[in-house]
C-alpha cells in the first residue's frame, strides 16, 4: 500500500512544475502535522474524558459513603435510645407483681397499730412472708441452703472462722449471717457464713 502511494506521489511530482512541487510538499507536510496533532488531541480528549469519568465515579462513591455513614449513625442512635428505654422499663413486669405484697404489708402495718391479738399479727406477717417467697420462687429465685453444709468457696462467702462447737461441724458452715440466693441455678447473692474449724 505504501509503495503504491509513493508511486502515485512520484507521478504527481513528475507532472507538476518545479514551483508546484514545493507547494505540494508543503501541503503534504502540513497534512502530516495536522494528522499528528489531531491524533494527539484525540488522545488528550480521551484522557480528559477518562479523568472526568473517574472524578464523577469518585464523587458518587463519596456521596454513597456519606449517606451510608449517616444512616448507620441514625441507626446507632435509634438502637441506643431503644436500649435505654428497654432498660428503664425492663423491671416493670416484675415490680407490678411485687405490688400486691406491698399492699399486704401496708394493711398489716395499719392493723398492727389497732390489733389487740398478737397471734393474729404474727400469722398475718407469716402469710405475707409466705406469699413473697412463693412469688420469688415463681421468678426463679431460690434460697441457698448453707447451714451445716460443707464450706464451698464457689457458693459461700466466709466472714470468719470459729472453733467448731461439735467435732462433726469442722470445715462446715456453723452459722449463716446473710442468706444467699440462686437465680435459675446461678448464684445471685453469695451467703455470708461462719465456718467451724
Image (cartoon, rainbow, N blue to C red):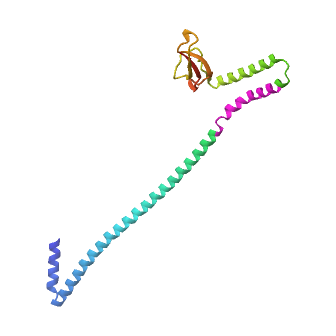
Percent across and percent down for residue 193 are: 58, 21
Residue 89 versus residue 120 in the image, above or below: below
* Badge count: 0
Percent across and percent down for residue 156 are: 55, 22
Percent across and percent down for residue 165 are: 58, 11
Q: Quadrant of the N terminus?
A: bottom left
Left or right of 114: which side holds 56? left
Left or right of 60: which side holds 14? left
Q: Main secondary structure of the magenta part?
A: helix
Left or right of 53: which side holds 22? left
- The quarter of the picture where residue 145 lies is top right
- The quarter of the picture where residue 22 lies is bottom left
Q: Is residue 176 magenta?
A: no
Residue 105 versus residue 70 in the image, above or below: above
Left or right of 23: which side holds 46? right
Seen at 68% across and 24% down, the residue is 135
Q: What residue span does the magenta drawing correspond to?
A: 88-110
Judging depth in this view, the residue of 123 and 85 nearest the camera is: 123
Judging depth in this view, the residue of 157 and 48 nearest the camera is: 157
Judging depth in this view, the residue of 39 and 183 nearest the camera is: 183
Residue 36 versus residue 91 in the image, above or below: below
Q: Going by the picture, which residue comes out furthest to the top?
A: 167
Seen at 54% across and 9% down, the residue is 167
Seen at 19% across and 83% down, the residue is 25
Residue 141 versus residue 69 in the image, above or below: above
Percent across and percent down for residue 116 are: 85, 19
Amino acid at each position: 500500500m505504501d509503495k503504491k502511494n509513493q508511486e502515485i506521489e512520484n507521478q504527481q511530482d513528475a507532472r507538476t512544475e518545479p514551483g508546484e512541487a514545493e507547494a505540494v510538499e508543503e501541503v503534504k507536510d502540513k497534512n502530516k502535522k495536522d494528522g499528528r496533532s489531531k491524533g494527539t488531541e484525540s488522545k488528550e480528549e480521551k484522557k480528559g474524558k477518562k479523568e472526568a469519568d473517574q472524578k464523577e465515579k469518585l464523587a458518587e462513591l463519596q456521596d454513597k459513603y456519606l449517606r451510608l455513614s449517616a444512616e448507620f449513625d441514625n441507626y446507632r442512635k435509634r438502637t441506643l435510645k431503644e436500649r435505654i428505654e428497654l432498660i428503664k422499663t425492663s423491671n416493670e413486669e416484675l415490680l407490678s407483681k411485687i405490688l400486691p405484697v406491698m399492699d399486704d404489708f401496708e394493711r398489716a402495718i395499719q392493723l398492727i397499730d389497732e390489733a389487740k391479738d398478737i397471734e393474729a399479727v404474727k400469722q398475718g406477717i407469716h402469710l405475707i412472708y409466705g406469699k413473697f417467697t412463693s412469688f420469688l420462687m415463681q421468678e426463679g429465685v431460690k434460697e441457698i441452703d448453707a447451714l451445716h453444709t460443707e464450706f464451698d468457696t464457689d457458693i459461700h462467702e466466709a466472714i470468719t472462722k470459729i472453733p467448731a462447737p461439735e467435732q462433726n461441724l469442722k470445715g462446715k458452715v456453723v452459722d449463716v449471717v446473710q442468706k444467699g440466693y440462686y437465680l435459675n441455678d446461678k448464684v445471685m447473692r453469695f451467703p455470708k457464713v461462719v465456718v467451724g474449724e
